[in-house]
Image: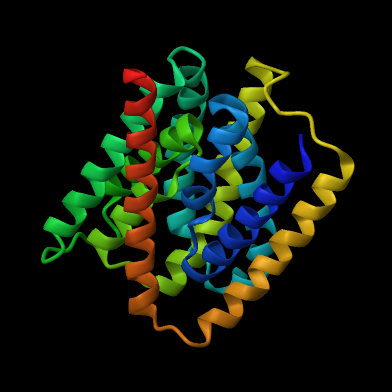
Amino acid sequence: MTLATAILIIGLVVVGSAAQRMAGLGFALLVAPFMTLLLGAHSGVLLVNVLGVISSVLILPRVWRSVDWSMFRWLGAFAVVGAVLGSWLALQFSPAVMAVAVGVIVIVALGASLVLSGNRFATDLRSPRAAAGFLSGLTNSLAGVGGPAVSAYAVLTRWNQTAFAATLQPYFILTGGVSVVTKLLLDPVALPRMEWWFWVLVFVSVIGGIVLGERLLRVVTPAQVRRFVILLAFAGATASLIRGIVDLVG
């Protein structure tokens, strides 16, 4: 890895961690498209999974009291199934095909959530939880982006932003961890080689991003954060779709 590449990745980690602290998600949405360009689809997505777990582990103690553990158990159980399936599928199809599929799925899901925003699903209904968890785990393994599916669920159910952001931290630790372990079992050399100093810088950068996000939270409202979540989800999905199309036609 060159010094320029390392600096670019560190910068992305800071911005992604700040978004993760503010909105509960955003790390993968911001980092994944660039990481796949720098390191390739499979290695890039795997590194995003690893860094996403680190970010959520550091954020979790700060939001522990707001976690909805009942919601986490339902979403997480089906997300594990999706993550394992997605890890296997990631090795069966080209990165371009995966990127297009993920982009389309996410855009459709978020589009439906906005169209139906006047309606409201009850948060205690189990089938929407199961569907959101499965799709999130699947897309997390395929493209490193698991947030948009649960974002769509949060919009449709009007899930409280504070509980939503907190609950996503153990959720991303679970789904990211399952994705990493499954991928390394299927392809032990998938993780790009990194120097020790890179991991030290990553750890420090995640902490810096979290501190930045907490300071920004003092000047934004929950409604602004929710809009930020939706915009991030659309941005990540659009970037994935465009990248996949360009690779397919190129």
> The N terminus is located in which quarter?
top right
Spot occupied by residue 164 in the image (x, y as percentages of width and height): 43, 65
Front-lying residue, 250 or 18: 250
User: What is the number of callouts on the image?
Assistant: 0
Front-lying residue, 185 or 238: 238
Spot occupied by residue 109 in the image (x, y as percentages of width and height): 24, 45
| Image height of 109 relative to 212, above or below | above
**Residue at image location 29% in from the left, 54% down from the top:** 152
> The C terminus is located in which quarter?
top left
| Residue ranking furthest to the bottom | 219
User: Horizontally, is 113 left or right of 88 in the view?
Assistant: left
Front-lying residue, 37 or 19: 37
**Residue at image location 60% in from the left, 35% down from the top:** 38
**Residue at image location 11% in from the left, 66% down from the top:** 118
| Residue ranking furthest to the top | 92
| Image height of 209 relative to 237, above or below | below
User: Horizontally, is 119 left or right of 130 in the view?
Assistant: left
Spot occupied by residue 69 in the image (x, y as percentages of width and height): 51, 60
Question: What colour scheme does the image use?
Answer: rainbow
Q: Could you say which quadrant of the image residue 208 lies in? A: bottom right
**Residue at image location 33% in from the left, 35% down from the top:** 241
Front-lying residue, 113 or 158: 113
Spot occupied by residue 134 in the image (x, y as percentages of width and height): 38, 37
